[in-house]
Image (cartoon, rainbow, N blue to C red):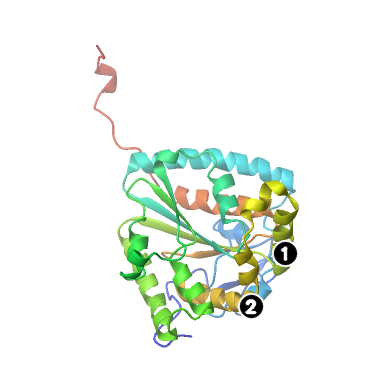
Amino acid sequence: MPSGVEPSSAGLGGGFRWGGPGWRNAGGDDRHGRGFLEHSMKGPRAPAHGKVHLDQIDPSDTSTFDGKKEQAEAELERLRGELDRLQELLYADHRRAVLIVLQGMDTAGKDGVIRHVFEGVNPQGVEVASFKAPSSTELEHDFLWRVHLHTPPKGHMAIFNRSHYEDVLAVRVHHLVPKEVWEERYRAINEFERELDREGTLVLKFFLHISKEEQKRRLEARLEDPTKHWKFSPSDLHERQFWSDYQSAYEELLELTSSQWAPWYVIPSDHKWFRNWCVSKVLVGALEEMHLKYPKGPEHPSSIKVP
């Protein structure tokens, strides 16, 4: 663990880790049922205390949904309608904003989540930003400078398809900056997200967790289907060589940057239908808990005559 950086002490329900079909806390208690999502309606979170072991989280697990793929897709359609309603309410209320962070290995489904979960939202109220290798101008500033430019204004949502977390992931795995530089960035990220929370932005972070075997299948599918050739990049194969390094980097990231105000949700993502349902369920539940309200209209509207 980096010197001077401690896991968030804000608390996320006792420090849970994925342990198969249910969640178990550090003391070994089993939350009976089909998973933490069922109990909290908030989804599987990264722990606020203790180690994260991604190899103990089954990327193919779907047990938090009590049904089959077809039923999940029907439920997703219902949740899309709820998200559309809540997005309009977010804009009308105009006191809060929402930032969704999507991270995961190549082929984990970040684009798929944006396409399927946000299918029905009003595009006027949503911005999607992708953070790849920084430009020469961006490198002249601190690493969060380019991120600030894309945070959502009041009443809006922003989706980060990859994010500021690349500056503690890729730079670490490929030794692009000294260790003491990326270690200090954990603190800067926590402070940045805390400030967003204070200013009224709900921050939800999703790690789309897939297996190395599933990634192989998805890359092969891109090569086999001519309509998907454009999705394939030789860099995907290069990055795949660093799988273990990325898993270690993600584990530390989840340990050090999951907080009450900006929680990480670890989403088993080998099954796309479950991934989409789970992200949608968490998002809709979080928006409902914001207690958004329509602003007051004119007094005595029935007495107003439109000429």
Name the residue type under label 2.
Ser
Identify which residue, 2 or 13, lies in the foreground: 2
Q: Secondary structure at mark 2?
A: helix
Which of the marked residues, 2 or 1, is nearer the chain's N terminus?
A: 1
Q: Which residue is mark 2?
A: 244
In x, y percent, where is residue 8? 43, 75
Classify 261 as above or below 120.
Answer: below
Whether residue 293 is visible here, answered yes or no, is: no
Classify 38 as above or below 54.
Answer: above
* Residue sitting at x 51%, y 48%: 284
Q: Residue furthest top?
A: 307
Q: What's the CA distance linking mark 2 and mark 1? A: 15 Å
**Quadrant where the image shows the C terminus:** top left
Position of 96 with respect to 264 (left or right) is left
Classify 126 as above or below 29.
Answer: above
Whether residue 257 is visible here, answered yes or no, is: yes
Hey, which quadrant is residue 179 in on the image? bottom left
In x, y percent, where is residue 18? 64, 70
* Residue sitting at x 50%, y 78%: 172
Q: Which residue is mark 1?
A: 216
Q: Secondary structure at mark 1?
A: helix
In x, y percent, where is residue 247? 60, 75
**Disc 2: CA contacts within 10 A as few (<14), some (14-19) or many (>=20):** few
Front tag of 2 and 1: 1
In x, y percent, where is residue 237? 65, 68
**Disc 1: CA contacts within 10 A as few (<14), some (14-19) or many (>=20):** few
Name the residue type under label 1.
Lys
